[in-house]
Image: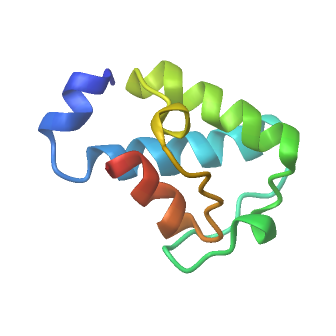
Amino acid sequence: MTGQAAEQEPGAVRTVVLDELRGTLADDGKPVPELDDDSVLLDTGLDSLGFAVLVTRLEDSLGYDPFTDLEDAVYPRTVGEFVAVYER
């Protein structure tokens, strides 16, 4: 799904972020936990390298990296906060 398609479909960005998160964990051979907005990112099994891979995969899927456009550094703690960064 391209960035434009994700913008047009309600909830599409959330779906892409969660799918890529699950895919990154699975590709690393890690168990994929149930994910909801309150899930703590550190508890998902994602390490710093996995996080970098996830952000790269999301840039490929969505066509943008919101972290490069933020004026202030943001460190999302939960899956919901992470998704919100991409939904801005």
Q: Residue at x 48, y 46 (%)?
A: 17
Q: Nearer the viewer, residue 12 or 88?
A: 88
Q: Position of residue 72 (x, y in %)?
A: 55, 51
Q: Which image quadrant for residue 33?
A: bottom right
Q: Nearer the viewer, residue 56 or 88?
A: 88
Quadrant in the picture for the N terminus: top left
Q: Specify whether residue 29 is in view.
A: no
Residue 9 as seen in the image, left or right of residue 56: left
Q: Nearer the viewer, residue 14 or 55?
A: 55
Q: Position of residue 3 (x, y in %)?
A: 30, 25
Residue 78 as seen in the image, left or right of residue 50: left
Q: Which image quadrant for residue 4?
A: top left
Q: Specify whether residue 60 is in view.
A: yes
Residue 50 as seen in the image, left or right of residue 33: right
Residue 54 as seen in the image, left or right of residue 6: right
Q: Residue at x 37, y 52 (%)?
A: 14
User: As drawn, which residue projects farthest toward the bottom?
Assistant: 38
Q: Residue at x 53, y 58 (%)?
A: 82
User: As drawn, which residue projects farthest toward the front?
Assistant: 71
